[in-house]
Image: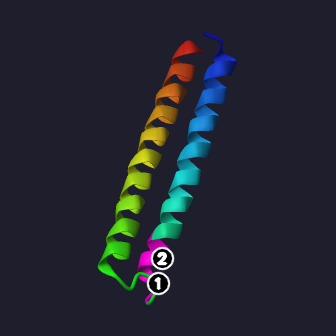
Amino acid sequence: MDKNIFEQKRSDYRRFGFTLLYLSVFLYLGVLIPGISDTAVKLYSLMGMTMVLLIASFTFFKKAIAYQKRIMEDE
């Protein structure tokens, strides 16, 4: 494949990773602010979504690193 395609995929995965990371921080702040998560269901759902988003963010960063390694190998 073309090197340019790998660079585009790497930048897209990094962008997705940062977006999910920012969203997970936003949800975690909802857990920390008193009064917003007044029930256990809300608290657990916010924490669960935070964990899911962090795992997805980590996965996208891992894919971006794999594409970066592939770009470096092709040079």
Q: Is residue 66 left or right of residue 2?
A: left
Residues in magenta, as a range: 28-34
Q: Which residue is mark 1?
A: 36
User: Residue at left 61%, top 22%?
Assistant: 6
Q: Amino acid at mark 2?
A: Gly
Q: For the residues marked 1 and 2, what is the alpha-carbon distance in whole angstroms?
A: 6 Å
Say which of 38 and 55 sits in front.
38
Residue 20 in the image: x percent, y percent?
53, 53
Residue 4 in the image: x percent, y percent?
69, 20
Other-residue count near label 2 (Cα within 10 Å), few / some / many at <14 / 14–19 / ≥20: some
Is 33 colored magenta in this rendering? Answer: yes
Q: Secondary structure at mark 2?
A: helix
Residue 44 in the image: x percent, y percent?
32, 70
The extreme top residue here reads: 1
Q: Main secondary structure of the magenta part?
A: helix
Is 26 colored magenta in this rendering? Answer: no
Q: Which residue is mark 2?
A: 30
- Quarter of the figure with residue 38: bottom left
Screen quadrant of the C terminus: top right
